[in-house]
Image: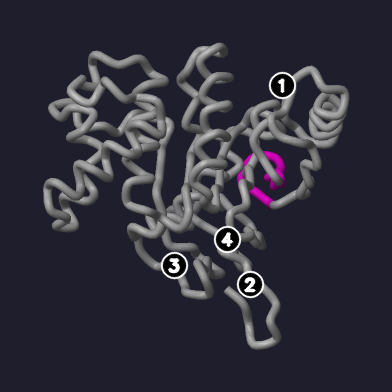
Amino acid sequence: MEDKSGVKKPKIECVNISKFFGEGQEKIHVLDTIDLAVKENEFIVVLGPGQSGKSTLLKIIAGLYKPSTGKAYLDGKELTHPGPDRGIVFQRYTLFPWKTVMGNVEMGPKLRGVPRKERRGLASRYIDLVGLKGFEKAYPHQLSGGMKQRVGIARAYVNNPKVMLLDEPFGQLDAQTRYFMEEETVRIWETEKRTVIFVTNNIEEAVYLGDRIAVLEGKMPGKLKKIYDVNLPRPRDYTDPAFLELRHTITEETELTL
């Protein structure tokens, strides 16, 4: 999307966003004057410690929370409520336990009234994309944690969102599965280009995934401390000296640990 001068506008823009919860003496200041612009098809990581407001920022972009001050925009339009233009994947597995993989993934198109044959075709495409072909009839209790998150990613993609929002989606996984899911996330993003905003408290994960890393500092209220450009080729190597140098720089300049 371009303005009248031909300059490309941000896909997502957060302007002067602050957020408070509660009233009076119990009022909690969660975010403080956040300004952030995200380009189309960019993979940006929001990195911060616990209670820095990073998930709250994501939920404001998702339309689940309203900012106390400021506004969030998608393609220049203010975001005031949830919509199919934003796909969301949470840390907790939000699958319907009584539905199969196919039933979970096709739910969005089904609710939109897409005919059965068409929605099955769409769901099958994304089930295949996330590497779950052959598991269409499996139920969530029969899947590993990584497989459940793959279902969640497929379910978000099948609605053809403009933006993917991922809120610490691999936080419950063991280290080996987490590394594998990071690789898969990059593969899926490169196959099905979308603007991605990914929230994490893990520096290594941020450096592996992001085109840029937006760091929120300290405890509440969260403030945008610095944005790092990640000028590393893909696929990335955790042992690459340039990777390790950027990881060390962010560690030294923030309150986060590895």
Q: Nearer the viewer, residue 25 or 132?
A: 132
Per the rendering, the mark at residue 18 is 4
Q: At 19% from the left edge and 42% from the top edge, which residue is drawn?
A: 120
On-image quarter of the C terminus: top right
Q: Earlier in the sequence, mark 3 or mark 1?
A: 3
- Find the magenta span and give its range: 212-223
Kindly identify the amino acid type of the residue bearing the numbered disc 3. Leu
In the rendering, at what x and y percent does residue 9 appear?
Answer: 63, 72
Q: CA distance from mark 1 to mark 4?
A: 28 Å
Per the rendering, the mark at residue 79 is 3
In the rendering, at what x and y percent does residue 237 appear?
Answer: 74, 23
Query: In the rendered structure, does residue 187 fall within the stretch colored magenta?
Result: no
Q: Earlier in the sequence, mark 4 or mark 3?
A: 4
In the rendering, at what x and y percent does residue 65 appear?
Answer: 41, 57
Q: CA distance from mark 4 to mark 2?
A: 22 Å
Callout 2: 10 Å neighbours few (<14), some, many (20+)?
some
- Mark nearer the viewer, 4 or 2: 2
Q: At 61% from the left edge and 44% from the top edge, which residue is drawn?
A: 220
Q: At 50% from the left edge and 65% from the top edge, which residue is drawn?
A: 68
Q: Nearer the viewer, residue 171 or 86?
A: 86
Element class at badge 4: strand
Kindly identify the amino acid type of the residue bearing the numbered disc 4. Ser
